[in-house]
Image (spheres, helix red, strand yellow):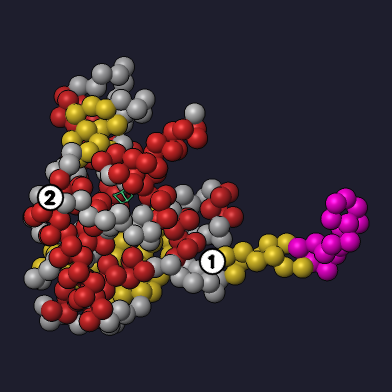
């Protein structure tokens, strides 16, 4: 089932169709055409589970397909920013470049962003466009901070005699790109099945909070990064998507709620608390939200 309500800035819920007819507030929270675009982006109309749906927790995808839910239009705008970014690219793909084609196999379907000579005269580059946070970028680029001795010591206070340190950036940490890697490799497989060879996979990530102090403190000093994505074995991908697809299909036909999403899929509960649109229909999300309200109160 689709998202059928908007959550307004004051927390009230309004049916999306009512919001588009008239806003009960003195003034709309964003331009009407933007709201219409937000509403339209929520209508998927696809029967089979997509690569992105299978990448999410099975419980989250199951709930999104079986219950009505409410979304904050502002949150959906981030996704829309992503698609307008896609559209800008889509209008300039003349030459040996393909874009935004939905490909299918027996298990899933996926729409890749760009394919072809997108970085040089080298053919066969699969590109994906992301608009993302500096936090996610810091993790994806393997940036972390290390306390380095300065050679000086504290002369007074509680830390008297202890060595002074300063934070320095390091860029050789673990690159947390597994979700992106699975997604791009899934598109790679779909392309290869259609006879298009893929030599490289690259993400072009635009930082959505670029220019802020917190962004610089995370070691992100550019607004755009090109991030190479490693190849994942086809056998692993096949098993991963078949397993997720089977679990989703079984739950949908038995009407049984799938097990709680894995810790990685629910970002160690951060997603449940703030970013999961169906948290109110999920027992795990409900418990976390109730606990959070109790703590805040
Ligand atoms: S315009 Fe914004 S504030 Fe008004 S009903 Fe729609 S979502 Fe709510
Ligand atoms: S609230 Fe958490 S566990 Fe429940 S569906 Fe959402 S992400 Fe999954």
Q: Residues within 10 Å of mark 2 (few under 14, many from 20)?
A: few
Question: Is residue 155 at all visible to an observer of this figure?
Answer: yes
Residue of label 2: 255
Residue 272 against residue 56 in the figure, above or below: above
Q: Residue at x 26, y 56 (%)?
A: 259
Residue in the foreground of this view, choosing between 134 and 32: 134
Residue of label 1: 143
Q: Residue at x 24, y 67 (%)?
A: 114
Position of residue 29 measured from the top left corner of the image (x, y, whole percent) = 32, 28
- The quarter holding residue 204 reads bottom left
Q: Is residue 258 left or right of residue 266?
A: left
Q: Residue at x 45, y 38 (%)?
A: 292
Q: Is residue 36 left or right of residue 181?
A: left
SS class, disc 1 = loop
Residue 84 against residue 13 in the figure, above or below: below
SS class, disc 2 = loop
- The quarter holding residue 232 reads bottom left
Residue 274 against residue 116 in the figure, above or below: above
Q: Which residues are magenta?
A: 150-165
């Amino acid at each position: 089932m689709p998202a059928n309500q908007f959550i307004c800035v004051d927390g009230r819920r309004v049916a999306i169709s009512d919001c588009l007819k008239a806003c009960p507030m003195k003034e709309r929270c964003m331009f009407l055409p933007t709201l219409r675009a937000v509403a339209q982006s929520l209508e998927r109309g696809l029967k089979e589970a997509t690569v992105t749906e299978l990448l999410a927790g099975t419980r989250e995808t199951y709930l999104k397909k079986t219950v009505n839910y409410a979304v904050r239009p502002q949150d959906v705008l981030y996704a829309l920013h992503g698609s307008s970014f896609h559209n800008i690219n889509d209008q300039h793909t003349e030459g040996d470049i393909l874009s935004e084609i939905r490909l299918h196999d027996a298990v899933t379907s996926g729409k890749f962003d760009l394919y072809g000579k997108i970085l040089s005269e080298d053919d066969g580059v699969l590109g994906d466009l992301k608009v993302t946070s500096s936090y996610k970028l810091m993790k994806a680029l393997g940036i972390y901070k290390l306390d380095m001795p300065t050679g000086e010591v504290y002369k007074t206070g509680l830390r008297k005699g202890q060595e002074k340190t300063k934070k320095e950036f390091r860029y050789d940490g673990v690159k947390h790109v597994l979700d992106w890697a699975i997604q791009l490799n899934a598109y790679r497989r779909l392309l290869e099945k259609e006879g298009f060879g893929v030599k490289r996979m690259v993400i072009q990530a635009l930082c959505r909070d670029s220019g802020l102090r917190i962004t610089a403190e995370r070691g992100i000093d550019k607004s755009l990064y090109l991030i190479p994505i490693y190849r994942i074995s086809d056998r692993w991908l096949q098993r991963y998507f078949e397993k997720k697809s089977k679990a989703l299909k079984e739950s949908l036909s038995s009407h049984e709620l799938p097990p709680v999403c894995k810790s990685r899929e629910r970002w160690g509960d951060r997603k449940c608390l703030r970013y999961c649109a169906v948290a109110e229909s999920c027992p795990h999300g409900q418990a976390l939200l109730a606990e959070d309200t109790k703590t805040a109160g």
